[in-house]
Amino acid sequence: QETGSSITLAASDLMMEVVYSIEVRATNAYNISTVFSHSLYRKEDPVPSLVPTGTGVYRPSDVVILDAIGDFSTCSGTAYYSPCPPQQYLSSGACVSCGTVTESQAYDQICRFGGPQLLYRWFFEFPQNQSRMYINANSDLMLKDLMPSTMPYTYVVEAYSSDYPAAMAESKFEFFVRQSDLIAMIDGGNRTVSQTADVIISAMGSYDPDDVQTILTYEWSCVMMSRPCRTTSGDLLSLTPSATVTIQTGMLSVGDVLTLKVSVASMDGRVGSAMTSLVVADSPVDMLYPGRIPGRHEQNVGTGRVPSGVSLLFTSQPEDLLPITWDVEGGNRTRRMMNYETNFPLDTNGNLFKIASDVLTTGLSFNISVSTLDGVAGGWYTTMLDNKPNAGKCVVTPPEGWALITKFTLSCAGFDDDDAIAHFSFSVGGTNKTMISATADPQVSVYLPAGETAISVQVTDKFGSVTLVELSPVFAQNLVGDVESAALDLLDNCARLGDLTLTQSAVYAVSMSQPTVAVATKMSEVLASVVQRSAISQFDALPLLQSLNGVVASATDPFTMSALEDLVSVVQAISTPEVLGMAQLDYSATVLAFTISQTLLADAEAQSQFIDTDSEAVEFGDAVDLLVETALKGFLAETGLSASGEAFLFEGQSNNNPVTGIAAVKRLSELASSPVSFAVAGITNDIAVTFPDGIAHVPELIDPDTESLVDVQVSYSASLPTNMRNIGGAKILSGALAIDLSGSSLPAPESNLMFDGEVLLTIPVDGNLLSSVSDQLQMFNGNSLQCVYWSGDQQPSPACPSAWCSDGCRVESVQQDLDSQGELVPLKGMVTCACTHLTTFAVNYGVSPIRFSAISPRQGDVFQVESGNLVSFTMSFENDLGGSANITNRSISPAYESFEEPTFEGGVFSWSPRSPGDYTLEYWLYLGDTVAEKRTITVRVLFCEHFLSSGQTLHGVAEGLGIAWQTLFTINPQIQSPDMIMAEAKARTWMCNSTMCELDGEKSGARIRIGRTVSIGPLQDLLQVAQSFGASFTQLARHNNRRLQSFDALSPNVFDLHHRLNASGVEVSYGGEQMCFVSNFAEGCYFAPAT
C-alpha cells in the first residue's frame, strides 16, 4: 500500500515476463473515489536508443531534413547478426556466449538480437505551452517552406518497439529559420562605355533568394579615384534610386574609371550590394555584356563567387555581335597557359564560352573577358572561385570486420569552410562508385561485402564546392557459413530498424555477394519497406537509384510479381520533380535510370500472365515513363548544360531491349525549325519529332528571364510488356515514344502540353507483334493503324477503349520499309503521327472511333487520268463517338487549270483537269471543330505522256502508239538506257476515264513523253501544223481530249480543225491552245511551221 500521486518500482524487484496489476484509487474531498488499474511486465527487450541529426540554422528556401537513427539497445550502434545462434558471437572460429563479452570486445559488433520492428513518431511542439501535434511515422522528417521566426522550431521524435511501445526513447530537435541576405546583381559586369552614347546600368537581376516576389528598393553611389563621381561640368553625378539608371551622353570624360555600387533593400530591413567598373572611351562602343549561366540548382547566385569543381558557362549579349573572342586572366592562370581543347570545350570564339571544371584555382579572382576581334567592343566578368572545405579528415571504424555482419562507422570531423558545410556524400566501391548516403550528418553506419572496399567522401559546402576524401580501403572477411542466411538476416534487421542509409549499404553489400533469387526478392521487399517509411529528398535520389540498380542487376532470373511491385513503389517514390528532378544527375546516372526502366519492363513481360488487371499494367507504364522523364529533366539541370547548345544521347540496354533518349536545351524559336531526331540501335535510324510553329507561343514555356529556353526530353523504349501492349484489347505495334518539354526554370515537365498546330512523330512499327495472319495482311491497308497516347485511363470510352487513347492524334502517313534492293520488307514500316499535345505515344493496330470509311481512297492513293477525262471518287466517314462530323476538301496544290472546276458535294469529288502534273488533294475529317484525321491523295494528270508501269517496255508502248521505240527514247533524254528506267515509288493506283475511276492495284513506274506539246499560234491552222509534224489526224484526236472542237453533239468524233467555240459560243481560232502531236519524228527532226 502506497499513497501519493506517483509510485516507483525497482525493475529488479519484478520477475521476468510476469504480468503485474497496479491499482490506484483517487478520492476527492467529498470522499468520492474512482479506481484506475494498470498492467505491466518486465521484458528482456532493452530500451531503444535514439541519435538525432540536423543543423541549427536554416534559410526559408532550404529543405529541412531531420533524421532519427534508432536502435534497440541503449548501447549505440548495436548490430544483431552473426553466423552464430542468438546471444552468441564468433571468436577464433567458435561461437561463444554473449554473456562473456567485455566492453572492449565491442558487443555492438558481434551479438545479434531477434526482436520486433523499431517504429517512430514525430510531433511538432508549440512554444507557448509545449503541447504537441502529431505529424507522421517516418524515420526522418522533411520540412519545406518554413517561415522565418525569432523563436526556434521544435520537433520531437519518439522511437519505440512494435511489440512493447512503452519501451521508448525521445529526442528533441530545435532549429532557427533565418532570412537570407538579398542578392544584388548589376547586368553586364565591368566594361568599357562610350562618351558619345547614353550609359545604361541595370540592377534588374537583383532578387530575394527566399521570395522572388519581394519588392526591392535601389540606391546607387559612384566613386572615382576614391572620390564621388563628377560630370564634365564639375557637378556631382546624380543617380536615380531605381532599378535602372541612365548617365546622359557627354556627362563623362574620356579616360574616367568609375566604380558604381548598388544597394538593394527590402521592407523588412535586409540589404545586399553589388559593384561594377566602367571605363570611358572616346569613340562609339558597341556594348558586349558577358555573364555567367549558373547551374539551375546552384545557390548563392550573384554573390561574385562561383562553386569550384564544376564547369563554368558564360554567354555574351547581344548574340549577333560576332566574331568575338574570349579570354581568362587573373589568379595564376591565363588562357594561353591552358590546354585549349580540354579546358574550353565550346571554343573561344562563339557566343557561349565554357571553362572545364578544376581549371581555375580556388580562392582567387579571375576576369572572364569578351571582345570583338577589332577590339572596339568588349566587357568582362569578374568572379572568384569559392574555396573548398578543408582541414578535416574522415575515418572508418573498425578498420576490418566481417562481411554482411560488422557495422562499420564512417565519420568526418574538423572540416572548415566559410560558407558552412551543406552535406557529406559517402560512397563505396572503386572506379564505379556507389553512393550510400548524402546527408548533413557527418557520420553514418554501413555494411560491406567480402574483400577490400574503397571508401570515399565528398564534402560539399553551400556554394556547391566539393572536397573529395579517399579513405584507406576496408577489409571485410568472407563468411565461412551460410551466406544466404546471413544476407536474409541482415536485410530483416534493416527492415526492422528502418534506417535508409543502413539499408542502402546492406543492399550494396548483399548485391555484391552473388545473391540467390530469394535474397534478391528480399532486397526489393526491404528497400520498398524502408523507403515507404522515410522522407525522401533530392539527396536520396542517386543513392536510391544505385540501390535499385544493385537489386535489378544482381537478379539472375526475372523478378516475381510481388518483387516487381516493391521495385515499382521505390521508382514512384523517387520519380518526382522534387527528388530525381532536383538531383543533378550525371550522364552515367541517367543511363542507369534507362537501364532500370528496361529491366522492369522486361520482367513485367515475363510475368504478364500474372497481371490480371488493367490497373496493374497502368501502374507499371506510369512508373517507368515517370522514371525516364524525371531522370532526363534532372540531367538537364546539371551545371554547365543550360543553353550550351549541346544535346545528349542516352543508350541503355537490358535483356536485349534497347531504350534510347535524347536531352537538349533549345530556344522555343528553334524548335519548329530544327526537328529532334535520333536512332535506336538495331531498330531504326528514322525516329524524328517535328514541332509546329505554335510551340513558340505556349504560355507555360515562355520565360523572359531565361530567353524562353526549354528542356527537350525524348525517349524511345523499343519493347513493351504484353500487358501494356494488349491492355483493354489494344494491339500496340511499336515501342513507346515519350516527348516532354518544360521551361528551363521549372522543376517538372508540363503534362499533356497543348499548343496550336500538330507535332509530327515518326515511329517504327512491326507487324510481327500481331498474332493473327489476317491482321498482318491488313496492316498496311490504310485503315488499320491508329496513333495513340498513354493516358492510364481506366474508364473505357470510344476514344479511350483502354489506357491507350486516340483523341487528338491521327495518322499523317504510313510507309512500308524497303530493303537494299528497293523491295518491300514484310510487316515493317514507319508511321508518322500528328498530335495536338505531348505525352507518350505509340502505334496501335485497330480502327479509330471516328475515321474515313473503307470506300474512301486510302492515304497516298494515286488517281491517274489523262487531261480532259474525269477524276471522281467518294469520301465518307464512320463515327462511333457521336456528335457532328464532316469532311472538307482543304486544298489542291499546286495551281492548276481545269476543263471543269473541282467540286466536292455530298462526299463526292469530281474534277476534269486540263494542265498536266501531280496534284495533291488534302481532306480533313472533323469532329466538331477538332481535326480527327487527315488524308492526302495524289492526282496524276497526263498530257502527251504515258506512265510506263513496271513490266512495260518502250517497245511495247511505242507499238501501241504506232511509232518507233527509238522515237520515245530520243524525246526522253532523262532515260539513260532503254533497258533500265528509274521508277517512282509503288503506290495504290486508280485508273480514270471519261466517266469513272477503277482500282488498278499497286503500281510503280515513270512518266515519259510520247510526243511534243505545241502552243498554236493565232494564225496557224491545225491541219498545217499536224502535217508539218508528220502526225496523223487519228493521233491528234486521240491525244488531245476536249481540246478539239466537235461539230455538234450528234457527231462527237467529227472535229473542226480550223475553229473552236469560246465560252460565249462564238467561233475563234485555236491560237494559244496547247496541243499534243505524236509522230515518228525525233526531237531534232521537228521544225517550226510559219506563224
Image (cartoon, rainbow, N blue to C red):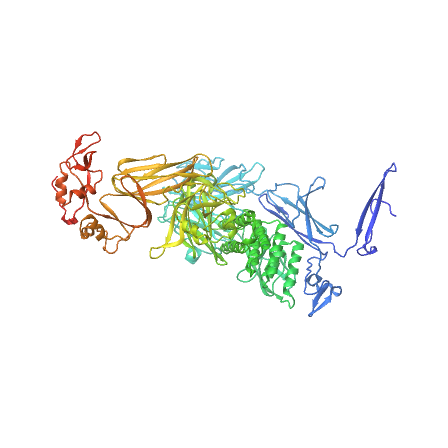
- In the rendered picture of this protein, how many numbered marks are placed on residues? 0
Residue at point 65% right, 67% down?
481
Residue 985, image x, y percentages: 32, 50
Residue 181 vs residue 173, the one in the foreground:
173
Residue 933 visible in the current orientation? yes
Q: Position of residue 177 (x, y in %)?
A: 62, 43
- Figure quadrant of the C terminus: top left
Q: Where does residue 671 sit, x and y in percent of width and height?
A: 41, 45
Q: Kindly give the residue lying farthest to the left in the view shown.
A: 1090
Q: Residue furthest front?
A: 1050
Residue 1029: image quadrant is top left
Along the horizontal axis of the image, is 1021 left or right of 890?
left
Above or below for 289 versus 953: above
Q: In this view, does 696 lie above or below 497?
A: above
Residue 6 as seen in the image, left or right of residue 337: right
Q: Which of 699 and 823 is in front in this view?
A: 823
**Residue 307 in sight:** no
Q: What residue lies at 73% left-to-right and 67% top-to-bottom?
A: 96
**Residue 1006: percent from left, percent from top:** 27, 50
